[in-house]
Amino acid sequence: MRAKFPFKKKRKRLGCGIGSGHGKTSTKGHKGQKARSGYSLRPGFEGGQTPLYRRLPKRGFNNNAFRRELSIVNLEDIAKLEETEITPELLQAKGVVKKFKTGLKVLGEGQLARPVTVKAHRFSASAKTKIEKAGGKVVLL
């Protein structure tokens, strides 16, 4: 008797007589496009009917070629670091920013208790005022 779990599933042998359970139509049903040899359909094909992606109008503006995706860091993340000069490279090395994209933007979530110099590509208005209020400096890259 064979073991229950470490078994190898038998391959479906098509067209090998009625006794196999996969004879005659070879599990393809009766006639039609899907029963023919070499059948494959591209995604979105609707049997010759104009497909949905062509029936719907194009809308909006797509600026993906020139889009700048910025990595985001909050002041509460900067407050946890001991360094006095914060740069994008330092944030990536410390693991605060996982993936550095085209730039770094500092947002004003949280509070700063000590003066720090923050170098980034963009700053929100609230982040800028909080950094300067704590006696720090904002440096645009």
Image: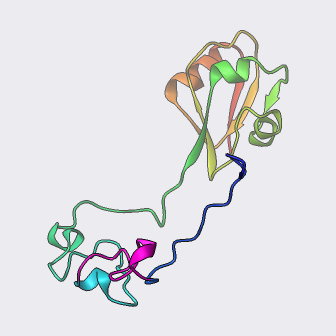
What secondary structure characterizes most of the magenta part? loop
Left or right of 60, for residue 135: right
- Locate residue 137: give its quadrant: top right
| Above or below: residue 116 compared with residue 24 | above
Which segment is the magenta one? 17-30
Furthest residue toward top: 113
| Above or below: residue 9 compared with residue 36 | above
Q: Residue at x 38, y 78 (%)?
A: 18
Left or right of 22, for residue 95: right
Q: Residue at x 57, y 46 (%)?
A: 70
Q: Position of residue 32 (x, y in %)?
A: 22, 84
Q: Position of residue 54 (x, y in %)?
A: 20, 74
- Front-lying residue, 76 or 116: 76
18 is within the stretch colored magenta: yes
Q: How many marks?
A: 0
- Coloration of the structure image: rainbow
Q: Position of residue 107 (x, y in %)?
A: 56, 28
| Above or below: residue 68 compared with residue 137 | below
Q: Residue at x 32, y 88 (%)?
A: 36
